[in-house]
């Protein structure tokens, strides 16, 4: 099969919508999550490890000075995608001709194609980076692109460079891809991958075992909330861009992960107190993330002392929620539905 004037488009492209309202996930993970959420109502099972480790967030954002999008979140992994009912297949790095030759068959089968390439070659990314003030040294970073369609002249991408970070369709001419590849061939079409459904539905027993194993190892003092507060003033004075401040990245990771974990809990047999506790915690963390962003941007009405008080309250809520979660899990004989009725009724 060859590319022609007719656009070959995966049938569910319009169902690929962001599942990460806090925009905290690595681009490839965000794309995978958005895709599988359009194929199954049970994609929130992938979030069982979203609580993660706040020490890992501290090491990433503070000790290494890395942005949240580079954080290797312990959820939306290849193994968990397999439990959900999908295989992630990779062809590795390919040249432009092999990439173009392989697209038609995959797209015609309804499979998206993902690849990494330098984002500064794409006009919509240049416009986005100009708009948000991306620092010069980060403009040439690789980004994962999601291909939802292609013709002989254009490639249909779904990307989230809008202000609300929602996935929207846009077309890019093959000339953009071929010219970019000619300039930096070693950095183009890296980790070309696709997603293939497996027979059957999600492996609920597998998720049950994995979630219990996660809870058995879950220990956290949530000291990071105090550290974010202690460093507010110094970071506002030192950061070369708001989005690069360690506290901004840390609270975004925490708010995003708590939001996703609260959605996972809705699929479980945990009680209302646990589920409501994490929903409230996610809401407060998201509000604080917005406030800390505004503080670093210089909003005059926000004081560091008020934000520190809110962070201390968030830490207390996190500690209470974790204690209730683990105590209830120890009492429940089953944390997820057993799948015997074919549904997810609690």
Image (cartoon, rainbow, N blue to C red):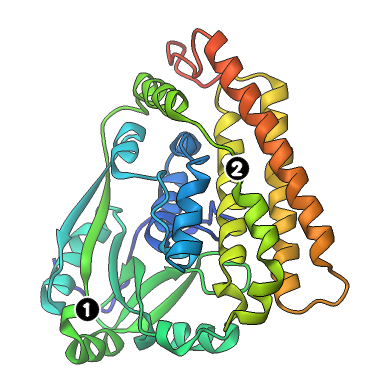
Give percent across and percent down for residue 310.
79, 51
Residue 254 at least partly seen: yes
Picture residue at 36% right of the left edge, 18% below the top? 205
Give percent across and percent down for residue 295.
75, 71
- 270 versus 76 height, above or below: above
Going by the image, does 63 lie left or right of 271? left
Give the residue at mark 2.
222
- 251 versus 169 height, above or below: above
Going by the image, does 188 lie left or right of 333? left
| Front-most of residues 11 and 159 | 159
Alpha carbon distance from label 1 to label 2: 38 Å
| Front-most of residues 204 and 62 | 62
Instruction: Assess disc 2: are there few (<14), some (14-19) or many (≥20) residues with their C-alpha within 10 Å of its C-alpha.
Output: some
- 179 versus 210 height, above or below: below
Give the residue at mark 1.
187
In the current view of this chain or complex, which residue is farthest to the right? Answer: 301
Observer-side mark, 1 or 2, equals 2
Question: Looking at the rendering, in which quadrant would you find the C terminus?
Answer: top right
Give the mark nearest the N terminus, 1 or 2.
1
Residue 269 at least partly seen: no
Instruction: Assess disc 1: are there few (<14), some (14-19) or many (≥20) residues with their C-alpha within 10 Å of its C-alpha.
Output: some
Q: Quadrant of residue 184?
A: bottom left
Give percent across and percent down for residue 101.
13, 71
Give percent across and percent down for residue 335.
51, 17
| Front-most of residues 46 and 241 | 241
Question: Looking at the rendering, in which quadrant would you find the N terminus?
Answer: bottom left
| Front-most of residues 338 and 270 | 270
Rendered image: mark on residue 199: none
Going by the image, does 61 lie left or right of 278? left
Picture residue at 43% right of the left edge, 21% below the top? 212
């Amino acid at each position: 099969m060859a590319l022609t004037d007719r656009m070959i488009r995966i049938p569910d492209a319009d169902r690929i919508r962001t599942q990460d309202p806090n925009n905290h996930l690595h681009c490839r993970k965000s794309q995978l999550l958005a895709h599988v959420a359009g194929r199954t109502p049970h994609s929130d099972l992938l979030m069982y490890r979203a609580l993660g480790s706040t020490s890992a967030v501290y090491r990433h954002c503070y000790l290494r000075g890395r942005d949240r999008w580079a954080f290797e979140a312990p959820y939306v992994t290849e193994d968990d995608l397999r439990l959900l009912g999908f295989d992630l297949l990779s062809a590795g790095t390919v040249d432009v001709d092999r990439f173009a030759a392989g697209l038609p068959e995959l797209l015609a089968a309804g499979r998206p194609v993902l690849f990494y390439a330098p984002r500064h070659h794409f006009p919509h990314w240049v416009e986005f980076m100009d708009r948000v003030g991306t620092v010069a040294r980060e403009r040439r970073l690789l980004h994962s692109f999601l291909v939802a369609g292609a013709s002989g002249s254009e490639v249909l991408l779904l990307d989230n460079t809008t202000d609300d970070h929602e996935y929207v369709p846009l077309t890019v001419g093959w000339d953009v891809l071929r010219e970019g590849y000619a300039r930096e061939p070693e950095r183009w079409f890296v980790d070309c991958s696709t997603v293939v459904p497996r027979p059957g539905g999600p492996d609920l027993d597998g998720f049950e075992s994995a979630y219990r194993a996660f809870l058995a190892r879950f220990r956290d003092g949530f000291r990071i909330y105090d550290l974010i507060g202690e460093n507010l003033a110094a970071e506002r004075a030192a950061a070369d861009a708001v989005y690069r401040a360690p506290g901004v990245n840390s609270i975004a990771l925490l708010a995003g992960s708590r939001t996703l974990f609260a959605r996972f809990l809705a699929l479980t047999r945990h009680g209302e107190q646990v589920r409501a506790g994490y929903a409230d915690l996610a809401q407060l963390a998201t509000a604080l993330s917005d406030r800390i962003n505004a503080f670093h941007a210089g909003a005059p009405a926000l004081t560091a002392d008020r934000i520190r008080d809110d962070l201390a309250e968030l830490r207390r809520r996190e500690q209470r929620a974790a204690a209730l979660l683990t105590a209830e899990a120890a009492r429940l004989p089953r944390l997820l539905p057993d799948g015997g009725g074919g549904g997810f009724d609690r």
